[in-house]
Image (spheres, rainbow, N blue to C red):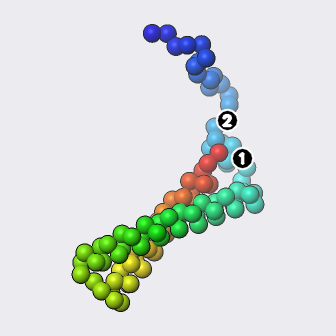
Amino acid sequence: MPVPSGYAAAPHGNQPSCFTKRLASLPISKQEEQSIRMGLMMGAMIGGATGILLGGFMGFRAGLRGKELLLQCGKTVAQSGGSFGVFMGVAQGLRC
């Protein structure tokens, strides 16, 4: 079946890739730095909220109460918030 004329692929001639453009613009600008920070903070907040839910559920399921439950939730919040924050910060940095 032939491809319609409006869906033809763009030519891949000598156009620079997104990665090449990013390397050519180093060091990063103030706006890009703020974008990376915003991605890091958004990821940390989402990961932290997820960590509260999952840490609390896992703690209750394990029979933890009081100080032990708070310590378990804190560890889970730090782990999930930190890892998802780094992931989102890197993703914002790689965006075109």
| Residue at 28 percent of width and 83 percent of height | 64
N-terminal label among 2 and 1 = 2
Q: Quadrant of residue 8?
A: top right
**In the image, is residue 57 above or below residue 27?**
below
Q: Is residue 68 above or below residue 36?
A: below
Disc 2 crowd, CA 10 A, few/some/many (<14, 14-19, 20+)? few
Three-letter code for the amino acid on which mark 2 is drawn: Pro
Label 2, secondary structure: give it.
loop
Residue that extends furthest to the top in the rendered view of this protein: 1
- Is 47 or 33 nearer to us in this picture? 47
Visible residue check, residue 80: no
Residue named by callout 2: 16
Q: Quadrant of the C terminus?
A: top right
Residue that carries the numbered disc 1 in the rendered image? 24
Q: Mark 2 and mark 1: span between their CA atoms?
A: 10 Å
Q: Which residue lies at the image location 59% right of the left edge and 66% below the top edge?
A: 41
Whether residue 9 is visible = yes
Residue at 68% across, 31% down: 15
What numbered label is drawn on residue 46?
none
Residue 91, percent from left and from top: 56, 53
* Residue 28 picture quarter: bottom right
Is residue 66 found left or right of 48 in the rendered image? Answer: left
Three-letter code, disc 1: Ala
